[in-house]
Image (spheres, helix red, strand yellow):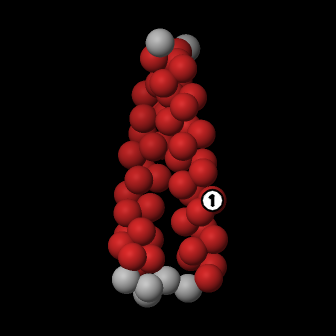
Amino acid sequence: MTKEKIAELRETLFNMERKIKPLEWDASRNQINEFKQQQLVKMKAEFITLQEELSKLEE
């Protein structure tokens, strides 16, 4: 179960990172609207939470 969960978390983190990077790029150039800015903040928070969960499972 834990190996499956770890693999699932890694895949989710990879996909989230692929969505976050373009938004960060737009934000760094002030080319992001309010909706996408809020979406970026939520995604970063969820990304951090999932990273912490993954590190706990890998211990």
Report which quarter residue 28 is drawn in: bottom left
For the residue pair 32 and 19, the one nearer the viewer reads as 32
Residue drawn 60% across and 48% down? 46
x and y percentages locating residue 19 in the rendered image: 43, 62
x and y percentages locating residue 32 in the rendered image: 49, 83
Q: Is residue 57 above or below residue 44?
A: above
Image quadrant containing the N terminus: top right
Residue drawn 38% across and 63% down? 21
**Is residue 22 left or right of 48 when viewed as pictured?**
left
For the residue pair 29 and 2, the one nearer the viewer reads as 29
Q: Is residue 57 above or below residue 10?
A: above
Mark 1 packing: few (<14 Cα in 10 Å), some, or many (20+)? few
For the residue pair 30 and 11, the one nearer the viewer reads as 30
x and y percentages locating residue 18 in the rendered image: 38, 57
**Is residue 53 left or right of 7 when viewed as pictured?**
right
**Is residue 22 left or right of 16 when viewed as pictured?**
left
Residue drawn 46% across and 53% down? 16
For the residue pair 38 and 16, the one nearer the viewer reads as 38
Q: Is residue 32 above or below residue 41?
A: below
Residue drawn 47% across and 12% down? 59
Residue position for label 1: 42
